[in-house]
Amino acid sequence: MRLKIMLFLICLSGSLWGQKKLLLRLEPGQSLNLLAQKKDCLAKDWGIWRYSIAAEDSAEVRQYLDQSLGPQNWQWEHQLQYRARPNDPEYDFWQWNMELLGLPEIWEETTGGLAGSDTLVVAVIDGGGDWQHEDLAENIYINWGEVPDDGIDNDQNGYIDDYRGWRGDSGDDDHLADSHASSVAGIIGAKGNNGIGMSGINWDIKIMLISGQSANSLLEESNILASYYYIWKMRQLYEASGGQEGAYIVVSNLSAGIDFGRPEDHPLWCGVYDSLGQAGILSVAASMNRKENIDEVGDMPCLCPSESLMTVSLSNRYDALDRNAPYGPLHLDLAAPGAVYTLRPNNTYNVFGGTSGAAPHLAGGIALLASYPAADWQAYLKAEPQAAMYLLRDILLASVSKKGDMEELKSGGRLDLGAAFGLLKSLYGPKEEENSFLWRRASDQIYLSYRTKRAGIYHLRITDIGGRQVFFAEKALGEGALTIWELGPFEGRQLLFISLYEEDRLIKTEKFVY
């Protein structure tokens, strides 16, 4: 009987006391002839509102909103669930995941934290987190423009007391020391090389804690939308103020979702990822913890059609797809480790798994790669933030460790941060001067030049990230000849792989971002 009552209450949570909640997008100045018991603005610049209506009016409201707004501009409120599963004590106190992902070689050159002179921030939408943890406190983001707990919006960003991130339901930063959130934050950025506990993927980083759950511990969709809006607004403020306000957020992590959810039921949620991408923010989301093809059965937010969203399945310690891992060649990008050693509240540690543990490996890796201290890379990251983050996405997908049992993932493999870092270095690291390709752009054309060492027949082959040939040419060249190939234009932004052959012998390879 007790279980039945609990289930009944959970099912009623969206319409408790005869109410139903809906989310809608309004244009500036637009109004609705809709009787609402309560309404709240969730994201002013995006025009997103939450209305509470009488449950018995829902059929009439649906018809009215479909006619007045269109089905793509409104939806019912939904609830999310965290995406962790029971711990596996076999992996206690052993960070096998760091070696597997190739992190030691990256740490030789960067341990995270800075992009040039800018402090990198990872936004974690979760249940709060233990910001006082001995191995996390130094890496918690602080909004220095705010005075804590004075009830005033000191920095005038529209939020009161958002000193250590933000909590959507209470409108301040009074985070719970949530175990799930603490574990996720520890994977991304537990303080490294401090002689305490463990190391996160980033030794030095700023983690912005955002509590997406409400006071009743439910992950309501409206809180998720408001959380994403807070992230977007803080990045916008950072750019507009030249780094004096807001936060330099480059990636967000959400280790939660809705099993079997579909984008047509969540148009407002799916829409936020493009807005974040335009601001230079990649978003990472965990998939369900079921061995299902999400392309067929559905999963939110993993099915959202945005280039700015990366989705993660689950691999195990044996470098294989976990027996509970989902797949989907259209919508699941790659796998990453779960069941790994990380933080728990009150200065404790334990194993944390499921796709909730897999997603922060990718989010933390994105932030770490963004900190690569090559001058050309940092200049590109600042000048073209959206394009630079999309390049990171393409690099991560192109550099996965291919696995036979992961062929039903979009990339066909498991996250390999060491390989991704090597690919980023090949694009923006030191270049060899002798016999290198020289690139020139003119309008929408790309020209590639090369000087030969020997006479012979030369073949130039260019493929895209999927291995498809997009250019091929053959030339007979003399010794020391300088030749120019006219390559472009290509459709859209692409990461290209160039191979040059002398007769049938491969003599040079390079990557180029178009």
Image (tube, helix red, strand yellow):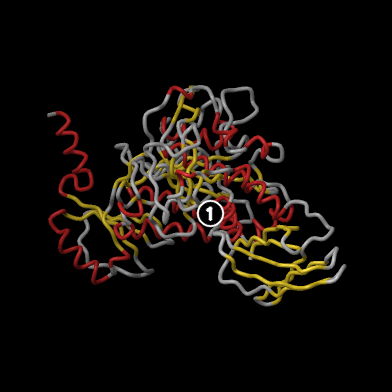
**Which image quarter: residue 4?**
top left
Q: Position of residue 263 (x, y in %)?
A: 34, 58
> Residue furthest toward the bottom?
443
Along the line of sight, the residue nearer the viewer: 157 or 127? 127
Q: Nearer the viewer, residue 388 or 14?
A: 388
Tell me the residue at 36%/70% (across/down): 29
Task: Give the left or right position of residue 161, taking residue 477 as reference.
Answer: left
- The structure residue drawn at horizontal position 59% and vertical position 30%, both measured from the top left corner, is 199
From this view, report whether residue 411 is shown above or below residue 217: below
Type of amino acid at the residue the image marks with label 1: Ile
Whether 100 is drawn above or below 258: the answer is above
Q: Is residue 251 above or below residue 443?
A: above
Residue positioned most to the front: 504
Q: Which corner quadrant holds the C terminus?
A: bottom right
Regarding residue 107, the answer to whether it shows in the image is yes
**Disc 1: which residue:** 281
Q: Position of residue 393 (x, y in %)?
A: 55, 53
Coordinates of residue 371 in the picture (x, y in percent): 65, 46
- Relative to residue 6, is residue 423 drawn left or right? right
In the visual, does 274 lie left or right of 434? left
Q: Quadrant of residue 448?
A: bottom right
Q: Residue furthest right?
A: 480
| Quarter of the figure with the N terminus | top left
Question: Where is residue 148 drawn, in percent x and y?
Answer: 50, 38
State the count of labels: 1
The crowding category of the residue bearing disc 1, from other C-alpha atoms within 10 Å (few below 14, some 14 to 19, many at least 20), is many
* Residue in view at x 42 percent, y 26 percent: 88
Q: Look at the image and tell me whether residue 160 can be seen.
A: no
Which element type, helix, strand or loop, lies under badge 1?
loop
Residue under the image location 43 percent in, 22 percent down:
89
- Where 195 falls versus 310 (above or below)? above
